[in-house]
Image (spheres, helix red, strand yellow):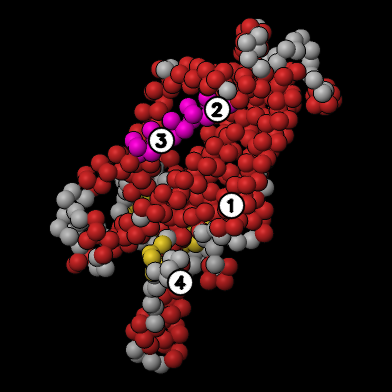
Amino acid sequence: MNKIFIIIQREYLSRVKKRSFLILTFLTPVLIAGIYAFMIWMMLKDDTESRTIAVINESELVEPVASHDFTTYKYLENTSFEEAKAQMDEKNYYAILVIPKNIMEIKMAELFSFKQVTIEVKSETGSQLRDHIENLKRSEIIALANMPDLEQKLAATKTPISMKTIKFGEDGEIKQSSTEIAMAIGFISSFIIYMFIFMYGVQVMRGVIEEKSNRIVEVIISSVKPFQLMMGKIVGVAMVGLTQFIMWVILSGVLIAVGMAVVLPGVDMESLQQAKTLSELPEGAATLNPDQLKMAQELLGTFDFAYVAGILGAFVFFFLGGYLLYSALFAAVGSAVDNETETQQFMIPITIPLIMAMYIGFAVAKNPEGSLAFWGSIIPLTSPIVMLVRIPYGVPLWELLLSMFLLIGTFLLVTWIAAKIYRTGILMYGKKVSYKEIWKWLRYHN
């Protein structure tokens, strides 16, 4: 056992002391925060590009689209489509909007351009046309009904409803929740596990191939058993990944705290959580609009200590369980080949369950209680990813314990199988290995 600890220490220290590890550990949270901040900024940034769209109105509608902001609609009189097309460069038209004569029947207009129009131009133009036609039809109905106040009555029937989700705790306590946040937590957690399994599993495989190709392993196994060497490498790299994850959590927490202090300086988070309207907001949060207030309340209401601790605990367990399971397979693959180019045929059976787990996760988000969600979170090859998608929605304790038990049991079984491959393959050189050859290794008794 002492030899395994020595190997773990060597694998761990040799990686955490690398400059690339330190840079990746400290810069990744900053880069992720920067990417999300940039994406939010881009989504909130207004389109200030000036555009002129020529309009050929063949219908009887009176100017159904109107110029707004930086988009100008220029109606062409006595101009054919071909003439307008020929004048696009000269007149600097961004696009040509053709409103057909029978638009009320076919409910479709055409927007021509030499380049793909932006989604905002398309949606705004279509929205104006739709609203104009709906207003015309509404006016016709009002005129036929001969009720002057019918339009006001119809407008009064429009009642926007927002849906607030509430969960009952184990003791019947009422607690605010958010389906969107639960889905985001599940997908982010499962993606991180998927990424970590591949990233650190491949590190184990490359380490085995490197030691094998350099003949270092011949010296090492003169002092330790192949199984001890394999377990030391797997556990050592697992500790590297766990260290990196803990550092990411701490750094992300600091970045979130700093971000909230900058966005909401001096705001009492408890008061913000309890506020129901903008008038009840504490001083310093007046810049929030109703939608932002709702999102802030959902975030603060969802992330209590018990919830966060449960998510992190499940993440650590399934990360370690999934990593240990797949790393044993990666180590076996690394011992069976002489270089990375030969790993492809053996990597496919390993990667398929992981990729399937990601796709199952999308289905689980729609139906967390379905049979696909259940079996995907129970089968050990997919459970590390699928279970993390289910947990934020709530998983029965017996299902969670069963998934954990099967994951541990499968890891022990796979480790035993991988060790039999490892002890033989680690000393095999210059021979292209096939599945038939690996099956022979598994049948060796000594």
Residue 123, given in percent of the width and then of the height, sits at 45, 57
Q: Is residue 329 above or below residue 4?
A: below
Residue 192 included in the magenta stretch of the image: no
Q: Residue at x 67, y 36 (%)?
A: 412
Q: Earlier in the sequence, mark 1 or mark 3?
A: 3
Q: Which residue is mark 1?
A: 401
Amino acid type of the residue that numbered disc 2 sits on in the rendered structure: Val
Provide residue 19's location: percent of width, then percent of height. Answer: 40, 17
How much space separates mark 2 and mark 3, taking CA atoms?
Answer: 16 Å
Q: Earlier in the sequence, mark 2 or mark 3?
A: 2
Residue 395: x and y, percent? 55, 58
Q: Earlier in the sequence, mark 1 or mark 2?
A: 2
Which residue is disc 2 drawn over? 235
Q: Kindly report the secondary structure that dominates the magenta region of the rendered protein.
A: helix
Distance of label 3 from label 4 (alpha carbons)? 57 Å
- Which residues are drawn in magenta? 234-252
Q: Position of residue 174 (x, y in %)?
A: 39, 69
The residue positioned 21% from the left and 50% from the top of the image is: 264
Q: Residue at x 26, y 65 (%)?
A: 274
Disc 4 element: helix
User: Which residue is more in the foreground, 193 or 151?
Assistant: 193
Q: Which is closer to the viewer, label 1 or label 3?
A: 1
Q: Which residue is mark 3?
A: 246
Q: Residue at image x 58%, y 31%?
A: 198
**Disc 1 to disc 4: CB gap under 8 Å:** no
Answer with the quarter of the image where residue 203 lies. top right
Q: Amino acid at mark 3?
A: Ile
Element type where label 2 sits in the image: helix
**The N terminus is located in which quarter?**
top right
**Total marks placed:** 4
Of marks 2 and 3, the one in the foreground: 2
Q: Quadrant of the C terminus?
A: top right
